[in-house]
Amino acid sequence: MTTKRNFIKQFFKDKKMVGAVAPSSKFLGQRMLENVDFSSDKIIVELGPGTGVFTDLIIARMAEDAQLFVFELNDNFYNSLNDRINDPRVKIIHDSAEHIMEYLNKDTRADVVISSLPLMIFSEELRNSVVQESFDCLKEEGKYIQFQYSKQSKKLLQSKYADVSIKFTVKNFPPAFVYTCLKA
Ligand SMILES: C[S@@+](CC[C@H](N)C(=O)[O-])C[C@H]1O[C@@H](n2cnc3c(N)ncnc32)[C@H](O)[C@@H]1O
């Protein structure tokens, strides 16, 4: 089965978890990563990789001594990423984004969190929990980068982060907003 067909299948199995009918475009991936400094951002967390469009772009850019922690809850996406990606710098984790810190080494904080989670279709409790966990796992100058199909997440992210900037791109289906949030 092609990646796109599998993505649609997973969407119809669990719309609230997958939250999109198609994988994101590489262009959106490039937009998501344009504010990541891969020479200094070495502890990287990715939330909700799906078929791994952004994961592949991150792996191609990350430093030799960087580490990538990838959280995917969907069984099918997790299994195919785990089978496909064999890189000692990358840890694919079959768990919810609410539990990031359980997987980072003690006293380690992330430089950047890159999230594709469909925040606005989550329950309020889950949304608050993953946004808080992401904030807590970041170091003081860390960045949280999130794409969404609306600006509805703006208030929530502004309530946590010192600075939130939003860029819009039509080069994705559906068009998307990329939020870049600075912790301090
Ligand atoms: C909108 S899709 C994005 C997929 C991919 N990053 C892309 O842009 O094409 C959201 C992804 O988040 C995953 N997901 C949903 N809830 C999650 C959770 N609590 N923890 C980790 N991943 C989750 C879904 O299984 C799905 O792969």
Image (cartoon, rainbow, N blue to C red):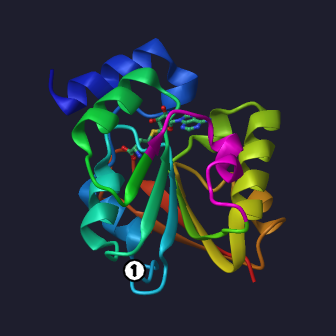
Is residue 40 part of the magenta span, yes or no?
no
* Residue type for callout 1: Phe
Ligand 1 under 8 Å from disc 1 Cβ: no
Is residue 104 part of the magenta span, yes or no?
yes
Decide: is 125 above or below 104.
above
Question: Which residue occupies the foreground of this view, 66 or 22?
Answer: 66
> Percent position (x, y) of residue 62?
34, 72
Q: Residue at x 75, y 30 (%)?
A: 123
Q: In the rendered image, which quarter is residue 9 located in?
A: top left
How many marks the image carries: the answer is 1
Q: Residue at x 70, y 75 (%)?
A: 139
Q: Residues within 10 Å of mark 1 (few under 14, many from 20)?
A: some
Q: In the rendered image, which quarter is residue 36 located in?
A: bottom left
Q: Residue furthest top?
A: 13
Q: Circle 1 is placed at which residue position?
A: 38
> Percent position (x, y) of residue 126?
75, 36
- Point out the image quarter for the N terminus: top left
Which region of the structure is painted magenta? 92-106
- Point out the image quarter for the C terminus: bottom right
Question: Which residue occupies the foreground of this view, 148 or 47?
Answer: 47
> Percent position (x, y) of residue 48?
49, 43
> Percent position (x, y) of residue 151?
63, 56
Say whether residue 59 is left or right of residue 149: left
Decide: is 80 above or below 116.
above
Q: Residue at x 44, y 13 (%)?
A: 13
Question: Which residue occupies the foreground of this view, 126 or 96?
Answer: 96
Q: Residue furthest left?
A: 1
Decide: is 80 above or below 59.
above
Q: Residue at x 42, y 72 (%)?
A: 66
SS of the residue at dot 1?
A: loop
